[in-house]
Amino acid sequence: MTPSSVNPSSVGLLDFAEQRLKWLGARQGVLAANVANADTPGWKARDLKPFSEVLAAHGASAASPVQTDPHHLAGTVAETADSKLLRGEQAPDGNQVSLDQQLEKIAQTDSDHEAVTALYRRYVGMFKEALGR
């Protein structure tokens, strides 16, 4: 294989980034619908399956943190009493949308999108540099 025949999109990381960006875009749409229906009686907040589950369904596995030293944090966060209380709350009209939760998820999704896009750009930039373009 010659350097000019290398296709950056055939590299696993770029495929992973592309799948993640598609998932993030779809999630923003679902979260936007939740916010738009925050006053709709009976509306139940929706979300997509976590991206790690989507990968697992396609035979891929997500990288997870590994504790390499007993002094390092384990990398998991226990559910707090506050998060348990917020989950499942419902307005008298049956609406289950918490604007605070939805806006937090939207901000996190936007932040994840920026991170994946930056990684994608850098990875493609490395290919261009290696190919002398």
Image (tube, rainbow, N blue to C red):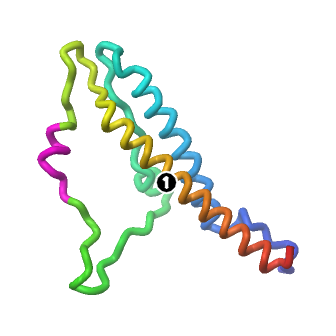
Instruction: Pick whichever, 54 or 26, lies toward us.
Output: 26
User: x and y percent of residue 80 in the render?
Assistant: 15, 51
Which image quarter holds the N terminus?
A: bottom right
Q: Determine the residue positioned at 58% across, 46% down.
A: 22
Q: Is residue 83 magenta?
A: yes
Furthest residue in direction left, as rendered: 81
- In the depicted structure, whether residue 50 falls above or below residue 6: above
User: x and y percent of residue 54 in the render?
Assistant: 46, 50
Q: Determine the residue positioned at 56% across, 54% down.
A: 114
Which image quarter holds the C terminus?
A: bottom right
Q: Determine the residue positioned at 72% across, 62% down.
A: 9
Left or right of residue 133, residue 12 in this image = left
Q: Quadrant of residue 2?
A: bottom right
Left or right of residue 9, residue 102 in this image = left
Instruction: Pick whichever, 93 or 16, lies toward us.
Output: 93
Left or right of residue 131, residue 86 in this image = left
Left or right of residue 75, residue 18 in this image = right
Count numbered badges in the picture.
1
Secondary structure found at label 1: helix
Q: Quadrant of residue 34?
A: top left
Q: Determine the residue positioned at 87% across, 74% down.
A: 4
Q: What amino acid is labelled 1 in the image? A: Asp
Which SS does the magenta portion mostly show? helix
Q: Which residue is mark 1?
A: 112
* Bounds of the magenta segment: 78-85
User: x and y percent of residue 116 in the render?
Assistant: 56, 58
User: x and y percent of residue 30 in the render?
Assistant: 46, 33
Mark 1 Cα-neighbour bin, 10 Å: few <14, some 14–19, many ≥20: some
